[in-house]
Amino acid sequence: MLTLVPLMLASVPPIATVNRLPDFGDYPTAVYKGPLRFPNERDWPDAHWAENAALKVNFAGHFTHIIISCGIACTSDWIIDRRNARMFRTPTGAGDVEPLKIETRADSNLMKIVWVGSRNDGSGDTFPPCFRQFFIWTGSGFRAYAKRTEIQCPPDVARPQ
């Protein structure tokens, strides 16, 4: 029985890590080393096809996160599966927010998103509040790590008039 006590204690995470935010190292994945595929230029919805196609894997082992312009004060975020050129939308927030910052790593299934309030009127204006949310790539889609939580906005986010 004495030999089981250290094993049981070793399996319990330290209290300091119970309430910490997820980190890229918590969701590791191997990075794809094969040929990188990309959608055909004629099918690509953005004028920067060559620049986008040249980007390396930067998410979940075989995806490239890309921001596509969809007009004045409009962008959309996508991930491209570089093994087969399939496109996936990144997670979307509720209708009251848009992504301000998306962080990814090639060797991690974790995506960190900072959302910012948006007027959704085509003006491009953003305003507090800001939120943080984490998503895990499961192999077939995104799973929210937790509900979004309000955070302090970066200084460049405008205050509503």
Image (tube, grey):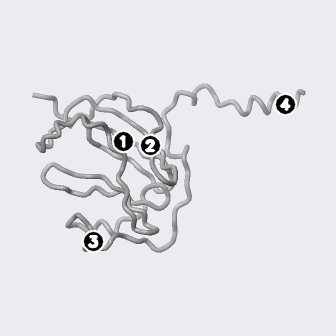
Residue 1: x and y, percent?
90, 27
In-image side of 141 versus 8 (left or right): left
Q: Could you give the CA–CA distance between mark 1 and mark 2, rounded to whole angstroms?
A: 8 Å
Question: Residue 135 shows which numbered tag?
Answer: 2
Residue 130: x and y, percent?
29, 32
Q: Element under label 1?
A: strand
Question: Is disc 1 in contact with disc 2, using a CB cutoff of under 8 Å?
Answer: yes
Query: Would you call the spot at circle 1 few (<14 residues within 10 Å), some (14-19), or many (20 or more)?
Result: many
What residue sits right under mark 3 in the picture?
50
Chain-order first, disc 2 or disc 3: 3
Q: Which residue is depicted at the point 61% across and 25% down?
A: 15
**Total residue callouts:** 4
What residue sits right under mark 4 in the picture?
4
Q: Could you give the CA–CA distance between mark 3 and mark 1, rounded to whole angstroms?
A: 26 Å
What residue sits right under mark 1 in the picture?
113
Q: Nearer the viewer, mark 1 or mark 2?
A: 2
Query: Would you call the spot at circle 4 few (<14 residues within 10 Å), some (14-19), or many (20 or more)?
Result: few
The amino acid pointed to by label 1 is: Ile
Chain-order first, disc 3 or disc 1: 3
In-image side of 158 versus 114 (left or right): left
Q: Could you give the CA–CA distance between mark 2 and mark 4, rounded to whole angstroms?
A: 36 Å
The amino acid pointed to by label 2 is: Phe
The amino acid pointed to by label 4 is: Leu
Q: Element under label 3?
A: helix
Question: Is disc 2 in contact with disc 3, using a CB cutoff of under 8 Å?
Answer: no
Up-down: is 85 above or below 98? below
The amino acid pointed to by label 3 is: Ala
Residue 93: x and y, percent?
32, 39
Query: Would you call the spot at circle 3 few (<14 residues within 10 Å), some (14-19), or many (20 or more)?
Result: few
Query: Would you call the spot at circle 2 few (<14 residues within 10 Å), some (14-19), or many (20 or more)?
Result: many
Q: Element under label 4?
A: helix
